[in-house]
Amino acid sequence: MTAAELRENLFVALDTLRSHKVRSGLTVLGIVIGVTSVITVAAVIEGLNRSVQQRVEGIGSRTFFVSRIPFATFGRLPENIRRRKYLRYADAAYLAEAVPSLEFVTPFANRPSFGERQMSGNEIRYGAERVERLFLRGAEPEQARAIPLLAIAQGRFITRYDLDHSRPVVVIGDAIANALFPALDPIGKTVRLNGRPYEVIGVFEKDPGLFGGPGVDQFAIIPLTNFRKSYPEIREVLLAFSIARDADIEVAKNEVIEALRRLRRVPGGQENDFELISPDFLSNLWSQLTGALVLLTGIISSVGLLVGGIGVMNIMLISVTERTSEIGVRKAIGARRSDIRVQFLLEAVVLSFTGGAIGILLGAALAQVIRALVPAVPAAISYLWVALGVAISISVGIFFGYYPANRAANLDPIVCLRYE
């Protein structure tokens, strides 16, 4: 078939669809729903994937964490995990000596810390202003090297002098600083952190967190020595270590595991009684969480596309019946079976493509609305999914339109001319 013949068949198909606007519109509704759901959910997942990746990069690709219990655990922990020995602050010095390929090892602790019961919430005050539900951490100067997200916007981070002298100084998140000092420079001011006076020495760069959860904006970090003195009841200790640039990551990780097993006297053949968390644990966790969402979306969109495809097939069968005489005339003046088949197949493709295009536009619009109303869900349109939406809609037209088109092509011209 020549390009001119294909263009003529396309124009005939468009004229036919324009003459039945309402029927055609209702037919493509299922395809619109299916493609809209695919594009919208894909945009949300794409945006969240980018946020997770940025968060992983903010932690550092060669930074790892050691904890007594797994991160991001849900429900009650098994007995064998709850009975594990606590990590100690001195374990950091042991690791640094036992594994030379580590750039640094630094302990830190949180209040309320992982796995321990929260006895009272954290609170920070300045004058009449107060902030609650902040995340209090005791850390060493290397904490900023371990987690690049802890970048300083004003002032400075904790120094070795602060640590050695257990100074009552604190570095606060951007949200805390804005709440306590809406019109003042926070650096040098004395706040009361859980009732104790602390001098503000720095403010972190703005970081609202992931998916609306707690981020650096809600952090307050004090010297680890001061933290240990002020909160001796906190027993949960975590370690952060960074692998040197010239060292093999897998080899260094295995050396850390072996050193910790020796230190904690874990018998051979038994599993580790600690957790080694890699910087990509967020992306791995997110992949597990989105698996069910992708499956659910696929089911919903498949139902919509199936309904739309059946609608396309139905309207094309009706069209073949209504235009039986026209088919007979076209065949009588020389139209081949392939011409008839292509004509009706193009009508089905145009129907489904129109539904797909509308679905893509609606999905993009919904993604922008979600992004505007819920900033924690940064929906982003993926060109890959847009192309996939177009391909799906065209495929539906070809698949469900072939049978009616083939039926029209195989009609006997004599029977068609006698049809009333």
Image (tube, rainbow, N blue to C red):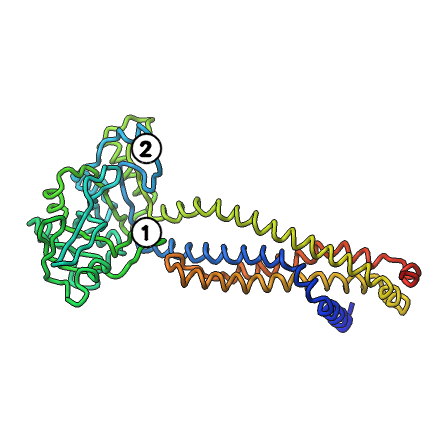
- The image shows residue 15 at horizontal and vertical percentages of 74, 71
Density class for disc 2 (Cα within 10 Å; few <14, some 14-19, many ≥20) is few
Look at label 1 and name its amino acid: Gly
The residue that appears at 73% across and 55% down in the rendered structure is: 314
Compare residues 241 and 379 and report the one nearer the observer.
379
Q: Secondary structure at mark 2?
A: loop
Q: Residue furthest left?
A: 165
Which secondary structure, mark 1? loop
For this rendering, which residue is in front, 68 or 390?
390
Q: Position of residue 290 (x, y in %)?
A: 45, 48
Cβ atoms under marks 1 and 2 closer than 8 Å: no
Quadrant hosting residue 188: bottom left
Residue to which mark 2 is pinned:
77
Quadrant in the picture for the C terminus: bottom right
Which mark is first along the chain, 2 or 1?
A: 2
Q: Quadrant of residue 390?
A: bottom right
Q: Position of residue 52 (x, y in %)?
A: 38, 53
31, above or below 262, in the image: below
Residue 213 — which label? 1
Name the foreground residue: 399 vs 263: 399
Q: Nearer the viewer, residue 277 or 177?
A: 177
